[in-house]
Amino acid sequence: QVQLVESGGGLVQAGGRLTLSCVVSGSIFSIDAMGWYRQAPGKQRELVAAIISGGSGNTKYADSVKDRFTISRDNAKNTVYLQMDSLKPEDTAVYYCAALGKSDYWGQGTQVTVSS
């Protein structure tokens, strides 16, 4: 089992910055990658960014957030971050942290609202 606790959401003006955090606990060895997903009202959940758990730390981003969002990890703190810069109203959504492996685990979600 893996437990995920997200924090850092909130209300920000367009052009602003927010950083989301996800603290991971439990069977961390079973995780292949960590991801941030988002779901806006009336839309399907989509992958925003992901980072490989192994040494390479390779990352992947949705085209809509490339060059604006940065995913990173702090292994000592068992924490994954999503730094979001130059936020746009269309980034408004509930953001979920996910631990991906043989089984996938999800956090409770944190609301991000970007006002125009």
Image (tube, helix red, strand yellow):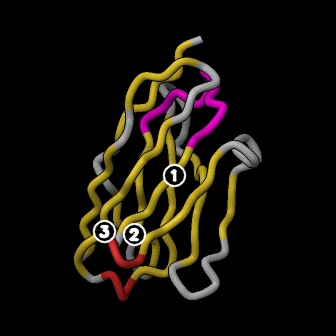
The circle on residue 104 is 2
Q: Are marks 3 and 2 in contact (CB under 8 Å)?
A: no
Which label sits in the foreground, 2 or 1?
Answer: 1
Residue occupying the point 25% across, 73% down? 25
Give the mark nearer the N terminus: 2 vs 1.
1
For this rendering, which residue is in front, 90 or 82?
Answer: 82
Residue occupying the point 58% across, 47% down? 46
In-image side of 101 versus 46 (left or right): left
Identify the element where label 3 is drawn. Answer: strand
The circle on residue 82 is 1
Q: Which quadrant holds the N terminus?
A: bottom left
Identify the element where label 1 is drawn. Answer: strand
How busy is the neighbourhood of tag 2: few (under 14 within 10 Å), some, or many (20 plus)? Answer: some
Which residue is most to the top?
116
The circle on residue 24 is 3
- Residue 107 % position (x, y): 31, 54
Q: Which stretch is magenta?
A: 84-94
Q: Amino acid at mark 1?
A: Leu
In-image side of 60 versus 49 (left or right): right
Picture quadrant of residue 86: top right
Give the mark nearer the N terminus: 3 vs 1.
3
Picture quadrant of residue 59: bottom right
Q: Amino acid at mark 2?
A: Asp
Residue occupying the point 54% across, 63% down? 72
Measure the alpha-carbon separation of dots 3 and 1. Answer: 14 Å
For this rendering, which residue is in front, 31 or 84?
Answer: 84
Q: Is residue 36 above or below residue 95?
A: below
